[in-house]
Amino acid sequence: MCPERDRTSSVNVGAPGGPAKTAANLARRAASSEAGRMRAALDRAGTTGELLTPRLDEIRRRPLFALQGYSGLHRSCGDVYFPASVEELRVLFRMARRTGRRITFRAGGQSFDGQALNDDIVISMHHFRSIEIDTQGARMTVGAGATWGAIARALAAHGFVPYTVVSTSHATAGGTVSGDCLSRFSGIASKEGHYVERLSLLSLDGQLLSLSRDEATSALFHAVIGGLGYLGAVIDVTYRVARVAPAGTPIRVVTQATRCASLEELATALLPRAEQLLHAEGGTADEDGWIPEALFSIAFHTLEGSRSMVLRSRYVPGTSHELRPLLIHRPRHVLRVPIEWLMRASVVSRGLWTLIDRFLFDVSRPYVDELMGYLFFMDGNVRAKRIAQTLGMPMLTVQQAFMIPYDPGAQEDSLRRLVDFLGKVDEIASRDGIPPLLLDVLHIQGDQFLLSANHGTDGFAVTLAFEASEEESAHRIGLRLSELSARALELGGRVYLVKNVHATAEHLQAMYAHALPEFVRLKRLVDPDGLLRNEFLERVFPAHFGAAPRPASP
């Protein structure tokens, strides 16, 4: 039987360093985190001062270790290794090639589906968590295991913020870059991959590759970002970051909410002005001083019907704006955990939203939040799930996101498609009595990352969130989401691959037919023996992935 999973976290903040130094810095710092490991390495050092190859039995391992996805719906039980250096990763790769065992990467454990689960070998990138900030160049280089909470705190001390960051502090850079993740700031600032300048990838043959948009490595760069860890181990990532305040100055977020009377009004209000956008993937020199703003919407079901509003948020330096936080942006508020638990029941959820809508949403003046509470509002849900788990209370989360295409040259037709899809969501919710706990919509610019739902097209990201108490309820929710996936395909849309995915293999094949052949080509190039495993991709694209590894050597 698999033992209980543990959680640990820490961070090293270092001086700025160039890309050529990053992998070595990460290796040294990760190795120094465990005195015993360092002493063993020094004992094996040769007369030249070079360290000999680590032994497999020196790498920390937890055999038959129980893991699960964030949703609580997907689980695995395999051997989990915790390498502390690139050299230890190479040892694990050689072992996999020799034995035919298959590898999956994991760090923060925040994947909704089976993206970071495996019943064979799971490699935790926990020790690769350095953070280096170049304040002059407005850049940072972070290890794959660095959490976004640690990253955001380190940046804020210097007056910087990420251009876009996911909504839980526990997620890691390696995990989110592998998903090309979005956030509320993506409505104007686009998704995470837009701000990646380079990344280091350790391939299965032990090569440490530096990937960027440069022509020589562009194809693999655009496959690894959003590639869900299926092409190699991301060691570190270099991002551009935004300065929003002088160093040492507190950063707050001001949000103005506007109620929408119709779905048409909501759809129109989500279109950003042209001057707000960065048009080129990777940005341009003209962006100096450009500060991202958030433009997004939320919708929810009350006892009196559905409600929606559009929200606009901006960063402000200093404390001149008096705090007026939204409850959802206070993850440790005393009411947050019981509210999260009660929201699992549909009728109770509508009742709570009725009270919140009537008495807590005052849109007459702006809300003002602390930076960390605003960025990582989902930490309240993480906390509620952890407490529930210790009490033996199942708390299952189902989230699925859809991309409905948007053509700037055919704005009216594009908005009509979005309204059509949102109307379908309401229709299914009313028909089956299973409304989403929360629905949010935002505009996303197109990109060139192969498995991105926005590959080659702008669109509206529509995310539906549900909570359930048992797997039967989650299954019924999945059937409705599969129905919505079919409707999204009819409208020319796609399912976002980073959250839960409920759709037929045929529908997903049609959605990603433009990208799968190239992604498969690159997968075979860097992993010809099929030693990297992604349970999720192999399940949702069975015709393309899941080739058996070569037999183990005698």
Image (tube, helix red, strand yellow):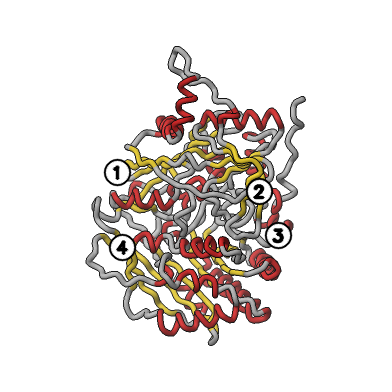
Q: Residues within 10 Å of mark 4 (few under 14, many from 20)?
A: many
Measure the C-alpha gap from mark 3 to mark 1. 46 Å
Q: Disc 4 or disc 1, which is closer to the eye? A: 4
- Looking at the image, tell me whether mark 2 or mark 4 is earlier in sequence order: 2
Eyeballing the image, is 437 above or below 535? below
* Residue annotated with mark 2: 2
Eyeballing the image, is 321 above or below 453? below
Q: Nearer the viewer, residue 207 or 524?
A: 207
Question: Is 254 situated left or right of 227 in this image?
Answer: left
* Residue annotated with mark 4: 252
Question: Is 491 situated left or right of 310 in this image?
Answer: right
Measure the C-alpha gap from mark 2 to mark 4. 43 Å
What amino acid is labelled 4 in the image? Arg
Is disc 2 placed on a helix, strand or loop?
loop
Q: Position of residue 554 (x, y in %)?
A: 77, 25
- Looking at the image, tell me whether mark 4 or mark 1 is earlier in sequence order: 1
Q: Position of residue 306 (x, y in %)?
A: 54, 81
Q: Position of residue 459 (x, y in %)?
A: 53, 62
Outermost residue, bottom side:
304
Question: Is 87 situated left or right of 527 in this image?
Answer: left
What amino acid is labelled 2 in the image? Cys
Q: Position of residue 198 (x, y in %)?
A: 45, 39
Residue 239 seen by the camera = yes
Q: Nearer the viewer, residue 505 or 69?
A: 69
Q: Disc 4 or disc 3, which is closer to the eye? A: 4
* Residue annotated with mark 3: 507
Question: Is 368 situated left or right of 534 in this image?
Answer: left
- Asked if the residue under mark 4 is in contact with the one under mark 2, i.e. CB atoms within 8 Å, the reply is no
* Residue annotated with mark 1: 135
Q: Residues within 10 Å of mark 2 (few under 14, many from 20)?
A: few
Measure the C-alpha gap from mark 3 to mark 2. 36 Å
Eyeballing the image, is 377 above or below 339? above
